[in-house]
Amino acid sequence: MRTDHGTVGARAAAVLAAASGLALSSPARAGKEATFWLPPEASTLAPEHDFVFYLIYWVSLGFFLVLMGTMAVFLVRYRQRREGERTSPIRGNHLLEIGWAAFPALLLVAFFAVGFRTYIDSSVPPKDAMEVRVTGRKWSWSYEYPQLGVSSDVLEVPAGEPVKLLMSSVDVIHSFFVPDFRVKKDVVPNRYTVVWFEAPEPGEHVVFCAEYCGDGHSRMLSKVKVVDRAEFDAWVAEQKAASGGLSSAERGGKLFKSKGCTGCHSTDGSPMLGPTMKGLYGKQEKFTDGTTATVDDNYLRESLMVPAAKVVEGFAPQMPPYQGQLDDDEVNDLIDYIKSLSE
């Protein structure tokens, strides 16, 4: 859980705010109510995002008032009063020139430090986060819980627990946006993007698409329903009973066999024509061109669609491409099955 906002970046911002004479609260003390500019804070990430926003806002407003006020004084003080009148000669001041260049530069460095830290906190989900697959399409959102074997058109999550969203699109670029959580991320065809959040209290929140995706863009709405753990477990049981189907990983296991993958890839670690699937997810692979990469969802998708793009060292490029033979749901099922062999 990422609830500690006492980071180096936040402390630097607080020092900067104090030095600038601005009354800014730290993220840990930020309230949860809506403000004139922003909706309520409904996630653990929201206070940190809001702190960065208000830091930049108040510093910018302070500079605007100082500069415009000085300009107004100069317009009055040094206006021309009589024909031919000249002002006193102006000589350079090196200390002043260095100061007005150095101080804004330091401000920009502080902004970068605070913003970068917030970006990292928002981009790297906790290891224990519950994974949910999000699929965007014209013009709706759908959610699948591969670890639980259920799916829904409403994103239902337990309060006080981190949730990792693994997102992809089946048609055009969409953007998953929950204003109350300060969460927004593009959802792109043929690849996965990741975002996470943790909602500490039960409630309902609106999901928007923030990327224009056609004439139904404004209707591409969904809902995040945050409930307590007992209610969430009851909902999962109800969904399982209603569907009576297999989990994503179980469907992927059947697909792995039906597509003939077992002819080249073992699932128990034994060597075959291709790399074993056991323990593959999360492994660092080395390729024939000397490069390396961590096996993640995007790597597995690429290996299924265009296997010759990255050939693992010690193996020949013999795998046929499955582009056009597998739909997005089948790709997701296969990836979840391969993941399950590493858990």
Image: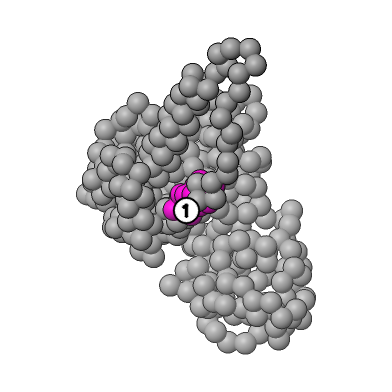
Residue 145 visible in this rendered orientation of the protein: no
Please determine whether, in this image, residue 180 is positioned above or below residue 323. above
Q: Which residue is mark 1?
A: 106
Nearer the observer, 251 or 33: 33
Q: Nearer the viewer, residue 126 or 204?
A: 126
Q: Mark 1 Cα within 10 Å, few/some/many (few <14, many 20+)?
A: few
Does residue 305 appear left or right of residue 244 in this picture? right
Q: Is residue 171 visible?
A: yes
Q: Nearer the viewer, residue 7 or 169?
A: 7
Spot occupied by residue 66 in the image (x, y as percentages of width and height): 43, 32
Report x, y in % for residue 268: 52, 82
What residue is at 49 percent from the left and 18 percent from the top?
Answer: 76
Where 225 sits versus 126, above or below?
above
What's drawn in magenta, residue-wise? 97-111
Residue at 63 percent of width and 44 percent of height: 170
Considering the image in quadrants, where does the N terminus appear?
bottom left
For the C terminus, give its image quadrant. Answer: bottom left
Q: Main secondary structure of the magenta part?
A: helix
Query: Could you tell whether 190 is left or right of 2 in the image?
Result: right
Residue 242, how many percent across, how many down?
38, 44
Q: Considering the numbered disc 1 on the image, is that residue within a helix, a strand or a loop?
A: helix
Q: Residue shown at 72%/75% (left/top)? A: 311
Instruction: Please state which amino acid type lies under the numbered disc 1.
Output: Leu
Q: Residue at x 49, y 57 (%)?
A: 248
Question: Percent position (x, y) of residue 31?
Answer: 25, 39
